[in-house]
Image (spheres, rainbow, N blue to C red):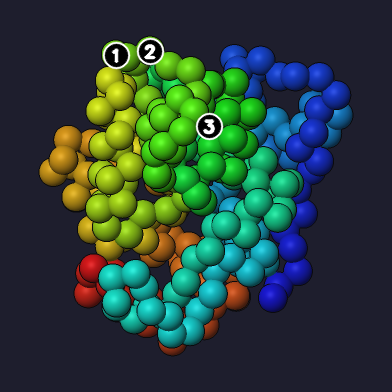
Amino acid sequence: MHPPIAFLDPLSPAPVPASAAAARRAAPAGAATDALPGGQPTAAPTPAQIAQALDALGAVKFGSFTLKSGATSPVYIDLRMLAGDPVLLAQVAKAYGRILDGLSFDRLAAIPLAGLPIGTAVALETGHPMVYPRPTVKQHGTGQSVEGPFAAGETVVVIDDLISSGLSKREAIAPLEAAGLKVRDVVVLIDRQGGGAADLVAAGYHLHAVLTLTEIVAHLHAAGRVDDAMRQTVLDFVAGGGGR
């Protein structure tokens, strides 16, 4: 495991309005190291910084791994580890926020389970309210399939950790639409390039990703964290369909 990437303390002594958060994310790249009172970074980290920080956290692993599809992958990405690093999680939320600034919606809709801590961090960073679809509907209490306040007809943007194929995203979107919510966009931290973007487009949705698997490997290779052989192995894997 590599030494951690240092970020400024993301905590601020006072709540930051959503408009101010958007202004920070829109700040020039050169302003990223400037801090607001309380140590609040003024802009989202670069994709290269995120890739290196995920690697340092141990969330990006290289070797031989069996995916849910049954395919063998040379890389495994475990973004559940973000919950154990609140500083990095806050920085990742800023990267999501930069994408969200260009979208039109009423609420966030985080997909359980890995998407929930990310969605919560994004909600805190941007000031946007959040709902989430239940993996299973309770047979007691309210019996709701979607948790959190909302009104039928509102538009939600789906938040998750990563995407391979689009199947799990379409399954998560179904209860949202059944509850009367509209979905146009899905935002993830990492697109594993396993056909998910095309799957979503075919279903009428648009995918937005902070990083692709190819970009992660390129950033880590440039930083000397991935050798030539592994870089080529991952590129060949992606070119072959990404384990789809």
Asked if disc 1 and disc 2 are in contact, CB closer than 8 Å, the reply is yes
Q: Residue furthest front?
A: 140
Residue at 81% across, 19% down: 14
Asked if disc 2 and disc 3 are in contact, CB closer than 8 Å, the reply is no
Secondary structure, mark 1, is: loop
Query: In the picture, residue 236 is in which quadrant?
Result: bottom left
* x then y, percent, for residue 2: 71, 73
Label 2 or label 3, whichever comes before in sequence order: 3
Q: How far apart are marks 1 and 2 (CA)?
A: 6 Å
Query: In the picture, residue 215 is in which quadrant?
Result: bottom left
What residue is shown with label 3? Answer: 97
Q: Is residue 219 above or below residue 150?
A: below
- Give the amino acid at mark 2: Ala
Query: In the picture, residue 146 is in which quadrant?
Result: top left
Label 3 or label 1, whichever comes before in sequence order: 3
* x then y, percent, for residue 71: 29, 78
- The dot on residue 151 is 2
What residue is shown with label 1? Answer: 153
- Give the amino acid at mark 3: Gly
Q: Distance between the residues labelled 2 and 3?
A: 23 Å
Give neighbour class at mark 2: few <14, some 14-19, many 20+ (Cα, 10 Å).
Answer: few
* x then y, percent, for residue 172: 33, 42
Q: In this view, does 57 lie to the left or right of 160?
A: right
Give neighbour class at mark 3: few <14, some 14-19, many 20+ (Cα, 10 Å).
Answer: many
Residue at 23% across, 68% down: 244
- Give the amino acid at mark 1: Gly
Q: In this view, does 186 lie above or below 60?
A: above
Secondary structure, mark 2, is: loop
Front of the two marks 2 and 3: 2
Q: Is residue 184 visible?
A: yes
